[in-house]
Amino acid sequence: MNYSLLLAGLAVAFFVLLLAAMQLGKWVGRRNEEKGASGVSIVEGSVFALLGLLVAFTFSGAAQRMADRRDLLVQEVNAIGTAWLRIDMVSAADQPRLRDQFRRYVDERINYYRSVADVAQRDVVAGRVGALQKEIWGTSMQAARASLPPFAASYVGAVNEMFDVATAQTVAQKVHPPVATYAFLGFLTLVAAGLVGLNLGASKRGTLLHQVVYAVVMTAALYIIIDFEFPRIGTIRIDQSDALLLSQRQSMVDPDGGTR
């Protein structure tokens, strides 16, 4: 499924709903031209204040989560690089096997990030990653028993850190606000659009341009929030950060210069 087109389609549909809500508000406003009551102003002010706060907090949270995912990817690349270098600290007999397992593991991590938008494929790749982690851990324990204790402890600690960061990244990819949060935000935006139309109708002012501008601004704000929340399916993306993992994979060569 092309999620970018789906997100764009939802944005267009929401834009139309906003225009419809303002038209409905204008119709109601023209039928009831009594305007300016203090109670009405308080209600309108409360709705717009709540909308502003909700947009601000949702926007900030989505942007922060995107930054956290990018930081975790950098941490994962560093952890993989450290563990790869520390393979030299274990018994020489186990090093070739470990290096082969590490390369396959990084290949699967790259596949995982490429499959984040496809939930079913992502889970399949995650299963292969888990199997490789068990394989690497078993070989690492075997190599550690045949190595000097200080070196073995340093290597095992690096492998453990590599797995921990990968787990944190996997969890971070699945952490999002409840759907009810976005549903309420959309509902509140439509209510605010109705109030805008109500005021335009009661005052008999405002043109279609004003309504379009409001609808465009609010639709763009919600689009950006969702794009921040799912940065691998829309316009705002963090795919560029994957270049760090690809670069790490290309650097994973054997001491004699060989690679696979």
Image: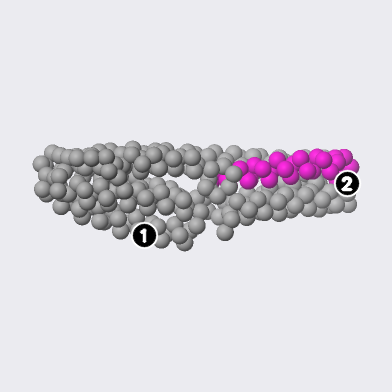
Which comes sooner in the sequence, label 1 or label 2?
A: 2
> In this view of the protein, which residue sits in the foreground, 75 or 89?
89
From the image, tell me which residue sits under label 1: 127
Quarter holding the N terminus is bottom right
Where disc 2 sits, the SS reads: loop
Residue 111, position as x, y percentages in the image: 42, 52
> In this view of the protein, which residue sits in the foreground, 193 or 252?
252
**Residue 206: within the magenta?**
yes
Range covered by the magenta-colored residues: 201-229
**Residue 249: within the magenta?**
no
Q: Main secondary structure of the magenta part?
A: helix
- Asked whether, in this view, residue 133 is left or right of residue 230, the answer is left
The residue at 53%/39% (across/down) is: 63
Identify the mark at residue 50; answer none if there is no mark: none
The residue at 15%/52% (across/down) is: 142
Mark 1 or 2: in front is 1
Q: Residues within 10 Å of mark 2 (few under 14, many from 20)?
A: some
The residue at 64%/42% (across/down) is: 221
From the image, tell me which residue sits under label 2: 33
**The image quarter in which residue 253 lies:** top left
The residue at 49%/43% (across/down) is: 239
Residue 201, position as x, y percentages in the image: 86, 46
- Asked whether, in this view, residue 200 is left or right of residue 165, the answer is right
Where disc 1 sits, the SS reads: helix
